[in-house]
Amino acid sequence: MIEFDEQLKRLVLKLVYYGPAMSGKTTNLLTLHDQLSLEGRGELMLLDTTEDRTIYFDLLPFFYVAPSGMKIKIKVYTVPGQVRHDATRKAVLQRADGIVFVADSRSTGMSVNYESFDNLEKNLSLVGLSIEQLPLLVQFNKRDRDDIVTEDEIRRAWGGTGLPILMASALEGWGVLETFRTILELTFDSINERFGLTNRFAVERDDFIDAVLKPSSL
Ligand SMILES: Nc1nc2c(ncn2[C@@H]2O[C@H](COP(=O)(O)OP(=O)(O)OP(=O)(O)O)[C@@H](O)[C@H]2O)c(=O)[nH]1
Ligand SMILES: [Mg+2]
């Protein structure tokens, strides 16, 4: 649920990277942090990991002030994918405004992708969100590996969901910005529909997204 304060001209958006254990959610955030300009980008918090497995969540915030004065903060979270951290996943999902489902492209990952997607659907309904109404896309990560399912097979298996499906290698650093751009576009359109932002507060979608996605000059 968007936090929107009309008087303070302040909007806070929450995006969540969800998916099975080891699919590359934390690596997506690390890559975003590396590839985007420091301007507007906050510090990346990786919370309590053991052996690189997320136990609580990771968080990367972004800040944007529109020419109209509207202040937008975007909080990007990852959930812990391991099955036993379900309570934490549910807590992180609360009040989400958009979801990136990071699936594992490896052929051994196909059944865990389905299990995790079912788990997402169940947890969304437990926190009062509807999978049909929330901006959501699927990223198939680890495309650099050679033990992966082909893109055709993926599109055949997941096409029926009607969700946007993107390919990526968070480790090599491609597909990550496209994923982030797409979820920002979907989420912006959805808030715009609900609050009429463009009309009332003049936050131009493309300016906003270009500002957030300013590449790092490093
Ligand atoms: N080859 C390859 N490895 C990747 C890619 N993305 C992540 N990995 C590796 O997969 C492992 C797990 O990545 P994480 O980003 O920690 O996965 P996660 O989804 O955050 O895992 P949990 O926190 O346990 O849910 C690490 O060894 C990463 O380096 C990728 O695109 N290609
Ligand atoms: Mg993680």
Image: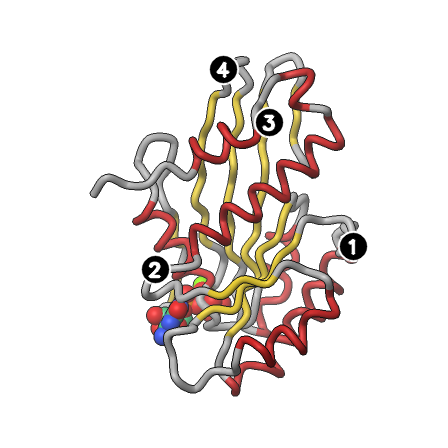
* Residue 53 in sight in this render: no
Q: Residue at x 42, y 58 (%)?
A: 28
What amino acid is labelled 1 in the image? Glu
Image coordinates for residue 121, horizontal then vertical, percent: 73, 63
Question: The C terminus is located in which quarter?
Answer: top left
What amino acid is labelled 4 in the image? Pro
Lower sequence index among marks 1 and 4: 4
Q: Observer-nearest residue: 205 or 47?
A: 205
Which label belongs to residue 11? 3
Residue depth check, mark 3 versus mark 2: number of the one nearer the observer: 2
What amino acid is labelled 2 in the image? Gly
Q: Residue at x 60, y 27 (%)?
A: 11
Under circle 4, the secondary element is: loop
Q: CA distance from mark 1 to mark 3?
A: 23 Å
Q: Observer-nearest residue: 76 or 146?
A: 146
The residue carrying mark 2 is 173
10 Å crowding of disc 1: few (<14), some (14-19), many (20+): few
Query: How is this picture coloured?
Result: secondary structure
Q: CA distance from mark 3 to mark 4?
A: 14 Å
10 Å crowding of disc 2: few (<14), some (14-19), many (20+): some
What amino acid is labelled 3 in the image? Leu
State whether label 4 is within 8 Å of ligand 1.
no
Lower sequence index among marks 3 and 2: 3
Which label belongs to residue 144? none
10 Å crowding of disc 3: few (<14), some (14-19), many (20+): some
Q: Is residue 142 left or right of residue 191?
A: left
The residue carrying mark 1 is 132
Residue depth check, mark 1 versus mark 3: number of the one nearer the observer: 1
Q: CA distance from mark 1 to mark 4?
A: 33 Å
Residue placed farthest to the front in the image?
152
